[in-house]
Amino acid sequence: MKLFAIPYAGGNSYCYRPLSAAVHNEIQWETLELPGRGKRLGEVLLGTIEDIAADVLKQIENQRFSAFALFGHSMGGLVAHRVAMMIQSNSRRAHALTHLILSGCRPPQFLDRGEGRASLSREELIIAIEKLGGLPAVIRQDEEMMAFFEPILRADFGAVDQYRVDKPICLDVPGMVLSGRDDQEVTSEHISGWRGAFNRTPEFHELPGQHFYFADQSETIGALISAFVLDKGSHQGGIVE
């Protein structure tokens, strides 16, 4: 089974490396590279979820897999959801997407934060990222590294903060929603909002940790994803201790 993963804000094709190593060997995990970073550093950054989703869909279609799953965390989850809607709206390829896994992201109806993080000062931007726990000290304390990552983070945050879905599509694909119990960015109320995004109630799994809860429990999450994608066993979801 092929699984395409979509990076979170500021991430690249290496951002899920421990998680990709933790899934079952029957799953071929590939984290896609988005423009303006990593292997595609020379390309222009994309400023909307719609444009990022279109790029992701093009990458997937170029590989011509007859069946695949999608995974995304935070911004990557929003992009994965958008791609799933795009796929379902085109009945010729709707059958190809077999599973959708959303992690640590608000559904579109909860995106109106009244913020505009793309226009924050560098100091304010660092504080906003620190609240998520996603900015290593080695980057935060290095002027050159911050100068490198800052445009990527601003573009990604800007894409998320301005994203709206005017006509949501209720998805037919089986869904799984993962979250961190102590995530202050994505609360249990936000997570419950994903129930209305699927025609069948998705699996919900709440795990210990904050926004980047998966960083130190790859084996547990890899097992959950593997069981879901490979349809091994019955999983009702719940809280993972």
Image (tube, rainbow, N blue to C red):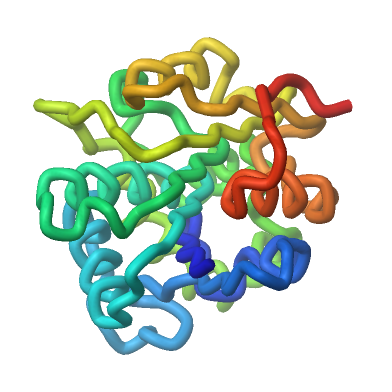
Residue at 34%, 54% in the rendered image: 97
Given residues 58 and 88, the one toward you in this image is: 88
Q: Quadrant of residue 173?
A: top left
Query: Measured from the top left, where is residue 55 in percent x and y?
Result: 23, 68
Query: Measured from the top left, where is residue 85 in percent x and y?
Result: 22, 42
Considering only vertical position in the picture, is 183 above or below 89? Answer: above
Considering only vertical position in the picture, is 108 above or below 163? Answer: above
Query: Measured from the top left, where is residue 35 in percent x and y?
Result: 31, 75
Residue at 68%, 46% in the rendered image: 232
In this view, the residue farthest toward the top is 189
Q: Quadrant of residue 198?
A: top left
In this view, the residue farthest toward the right is 241
Q: Quadrant of the C terminus?
A: top right
Query: Horizontal placement of 81 versus 169: left or right?
Result: right
Residue at 23%, 37% in the rendered image: 163
The reply to whether residue 113 is visible in this rendering is no
Query: Measured from the top left, where is residue 67 in percent x and y?
Result: 38, 64
Residue at 49%, 62% in the rendered image: 5
Query: Horizontal placement of 93 versus 148: left or right?
Result: left
Query: Horizontal placement of 72 versus 132: left or right?
Result: left
Q: Quadrant of residue 183?
A: top right
The reply to whether residue 82 is visible in this rendering is yes
- Count of number-bearing discs: 0
